[in-house]
Image (tube, rainbow, N blue to C red):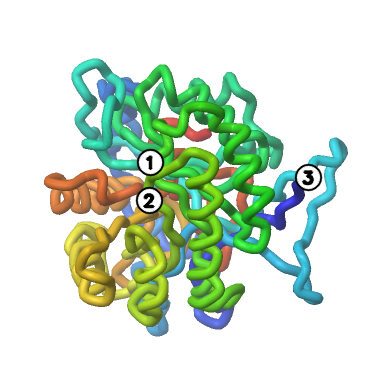
């Protein structure tokens, strides 16, 4: 099955992107500490951190009432899927613009006693199984990635069924005790994607925590709320027949959920992407409070019986400044620690974005799209 290219769901207003370069602004060198997988110090480095110092440069910062995030499907001018071409003739999506990450240096989430997540009492993490050259990661690659992630996260979110990713992630997650937040990428191709999901899962439906249908389809204008409500209902029926009895949802931006009650009514949970970086009034250390306020606002718009789950949130480590929102290694640490602190009582409510640097992506209008990874090595 061929899916369209993956591109960013973050704001791409070219008129607002200032295109700053490394030659524009500098702060004095800062000291950071490299950590190994266990969180122990390996070495100390001096880094020159790029920051905006000229107030005039931030005269027109980006500010949104909602913050698009994650991956979406790109369509061509005729409205059809834009299929990539490569030497191997692969039908998998060509990853392009979407958010990724850099090296987490000083955020040290507590590991479970055995080093692996055995339930959903830890934060979740989003994960894309693509290499820098746009090819699919191998089973060994995914095994290694999840082994590392399992120290800190109990659930891994994936977005689709291409690259045989469902079966590969199931095989890697099962011995680690991790759960999977699976995704049906194309709401117009539910029957085929459910079949691929079922093939990948096999008899391991107990590992599947949620299944989402689409990612930010309403926010991107690719579907209406009514379209997505119908897609969720269709997917739920097919998934029940396949043996999955857990929550089925559609993921969209928090703004889309606030403006479209039908999304919350159709989904078993209200699942939102929310990134404080795209609010120019929010500094990294206030990201946690911003996220808490956002969740509270969405909760008011969703049915009282529905839980609000943040399916993407994070902070970039490279790229352009957006008012008070400044990318950086230390800033990412401050943002993540802020969010961890405020959501410590229910960490399963939050999925951080993203596991590793996603170097297969294009820079995007803010030059951040590769650099959202929060693990301590680049993928």
Residue ID at (52%, 30%): 169
Please name the residue shown 63% across and 58% down the image: 186
Q: Is residue 137 left or right of residue 339?
A: right
Question: Tags 1 and 2 in contact by the CB under 8 Å rule?
Answer: yes
Disc with the residue nearer the chain's start (1 vs 2): 1
* Dot 2: element: loop
Q: Which residue is the site of mark 2?
A: 247
Please state the horizontal and vertical placement of residue 74, each as a whole percent of the image.
68, 64
Q: Earlier in the sequence, mark 2 or mark 3?
A: 3
What is the secondary structure assignment of the residue under circle 3? loop
Q: For mark 1, give the secondary structure.
A: strand
Judged by depth in the image, the label closer to the viewer, 1 or 2, is 2
For the residues marked 3 and 1, what is the alpha-carbon distance in whole angstroms?
A: 27 Å
Residue 18 makes an appearance in the image: no
Q: Which residue is mark 3?
A: 91
Label whose residue precedes the other's in the sequence (3 or 1): 3
Whole-percent x and y of residue 38?
Answer: 29, 21
Where does the image place residue 360, in percent across and percent down from the top left? Answer: 63, 45
> How far apart in space, not on screen, are marks 2 and 3 (Cα)?
29 Å
Relative image position of residue 189 (x, y in whole percent): 67, 57
As drawn, the label of residue 277 is none
Q: Nearer the viewer, mark 2 or mark 3?
A: 2
Q: CA distance from mark 1 to mark 2?
A: 7 Å
- The residue under the point 61% across, 58% down is 97
Q: Which residue is mark 1?
A: 209
């Amino acid at each position: 099955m061929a899916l369209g290219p993956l591109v960013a769901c973050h704001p791409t207003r070219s008129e607002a992107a200032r295109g700053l370069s490394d030659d524009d602004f500098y702060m004095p060198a800062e000291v950071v500490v490299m950590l190994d997988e266990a969180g122990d110090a390996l070495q100390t480095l001096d880094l020159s951190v790029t920051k905006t110092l000229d107030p005039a440069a931030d005269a027109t910062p980006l500010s949104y009432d909602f913050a698009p995030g994650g991956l979406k499907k790109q369509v061509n001018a005729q409205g059809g899927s834009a299929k990539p071409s490569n030497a191997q003739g692969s039908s998998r999506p060509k990853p392009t613009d979407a958010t990724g990450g850099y090296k987490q240096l000083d955020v040290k989430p507590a590991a479970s006693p055995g080093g692996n997540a055995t339930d959903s009492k830890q934060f979740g993490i989003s994960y894309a199984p693509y290499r820098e050259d746009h090819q699919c990661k191998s089973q060994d690659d995914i095994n290694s990635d999840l082994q590392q992630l399992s120290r800190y996260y109990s659930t891994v979110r994936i977005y689709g069924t291409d690259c045989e990713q469902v079966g590969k992630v199931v095989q890697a997650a099962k011995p680690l005790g991790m759960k999977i937040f699976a995704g049906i990428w194309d709401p117009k191709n539910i029957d085929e994607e459910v079949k691929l999901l079922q093939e990948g899962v096999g008899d391991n439906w107990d590992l599947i925590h949620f299944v989402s249908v689409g990612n930010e389809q309403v926010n991107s204008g690719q579907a209406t709320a009514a379209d997505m409500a119908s897609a969720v209902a269709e997917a739920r029926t097919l998934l029940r027949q396949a043996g999955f009895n857990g929550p089925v949802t559609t993921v969209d931006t928090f703004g889309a959920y606030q403006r479209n009650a039908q999304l919350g009514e159709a989904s078993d949970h209200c699942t939102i992407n929310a990134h404080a970086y795209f609010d120019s009034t929010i500094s990294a250390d206030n990201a946690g409070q911003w996220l808490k306020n956002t969740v509270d606002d969405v909760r008011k718009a969703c049915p009282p019986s529905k839980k609000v789950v943040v399916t993407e949130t994070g902070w970039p480590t490279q790229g352009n400044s957006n008012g008070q929102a400044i990318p950086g290694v230390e800033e990412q640490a401050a943002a993540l620690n802020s969010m961890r602190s405020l959501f410590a009582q229910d960490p399963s409510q939050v999925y951080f974005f993203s596991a590793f640097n996603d170097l297969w992506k294009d820079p995007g209008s803010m030059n951040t799209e590769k650099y959202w990874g929060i693990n301590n090595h680049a993928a």
